[in-house]
Amino acid sequence: MTSVKGGNSSGPADVAVDTVSSESVQRVKLVYGADGTGTRVDTATPLPVDDDATQSKLDTVITLLGTSVATQIAKDFSATSTATGHAVWIPASGKKIAITHFSLSTAGNVAGKVTMWFGAAADTTYTSGTDQVAFKGSFAPSSIASTYPGVVVQPASPILAGNADYSLRVTTDNSMTWDLVLYGYEF
C-alpha cells in the first residue's frame, strides 16, 4: 500500500492507494457512526441496516411461499350479465389465495359496481362489513362516447385471503360487460 500526500507532502496521507496491475487504485475502508466517529465494517462489526421494512416484506413473501417455491397463477374471466358471488378463483384444498395484481375493464353502455371478495364454498352473497373485500369499484362505460373505464391494481403487498379454501368471488349490481385478469399465488 502506498500513501499519496496532498498539497503538504510532510503532512498525513490524504488518500491510500494500492497498486493493481501497475495502476494506482484508491483504497477505501467502509466505516459508519456519528459525525466525527468511525466504526470499521468487518466480520465482527457488520454494517447495520434498518431492515424493518425489508423484514416485513420478507415475512410476507415467506408466508406467501411457505417452504417451497410457489408458481404464479393467472386467471381470466369475462361476463356480460349480473354476477352474484361468481367464483373466479377456487384455490386447491387447504390453500389460501394471494393476489399480486389484476386489471378490470368494462365495455358497453351499462354502468355498475364490481365487488371482488373472498367467500366460503357455499357463500355466494356478498355482505358488506362481514366478507373480506379485495376490490370494490363503480364504472360507467359509454359505447357512444367510446369510453371504456378500467383499473390496474398492483398493491405494495399481496392481497391475502384470510381463510384457507375461500374462493375469490365477484358480485356486480348490474348486467354490465366486464373483463378481469388477475395474477397471484396459492399458499
Image (cartoon, rainbow, N blue to C red):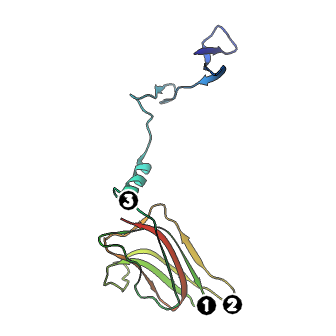
Q: Residues within 10 Å of mark 1 (few under 14, many from 20)?
A: some
Whether label 2 touches label 3, CB < 8 Å: no
Amino acid type of the residue that numbered disc 1 sits on in the rendered structure: Asn
Of the 4 image quadrants, the one containing the C terminus is bottom left
Amino acid type of the residue that numbered disc 3 sits on in the rendered structure: Leu
Whether label 2 touches label 1, CB < 8 Å: yes
Q: Residue at x 60, y 12 (%)?
A: 12
Kindly identify which residue carries mark 3. 65
Kindly identify which residue carries mark 2. 144
* Mark 1 / mark 3, whichever is N-terminal: 3
**C-alpha gap between disc 1 and disc 3:** 41 Å
Q: Residue at x 54, y 89 (%)?
A: 176
**C-alpha gap between disc 2 and disc 3:** 46 Å
Amino acid type of the residue that numbered disc 2 sits on in the rendered structure: Ile
Kindly identify which residue carries mark 1. 109
**C-alpha gap between disc 2 and disc 1:** 8 Å
* Mark 2 / mark 3, whichever is N-terminal: 3
Q: Residue at x 37, y 54 (%)?
A: 59
* Mark 2 / mark 1, whichever is N-terminal: 1
* Residue 172 disc label: none
Give the camera-side residue of 110 and 21. 21
Residue at far top of view: 10
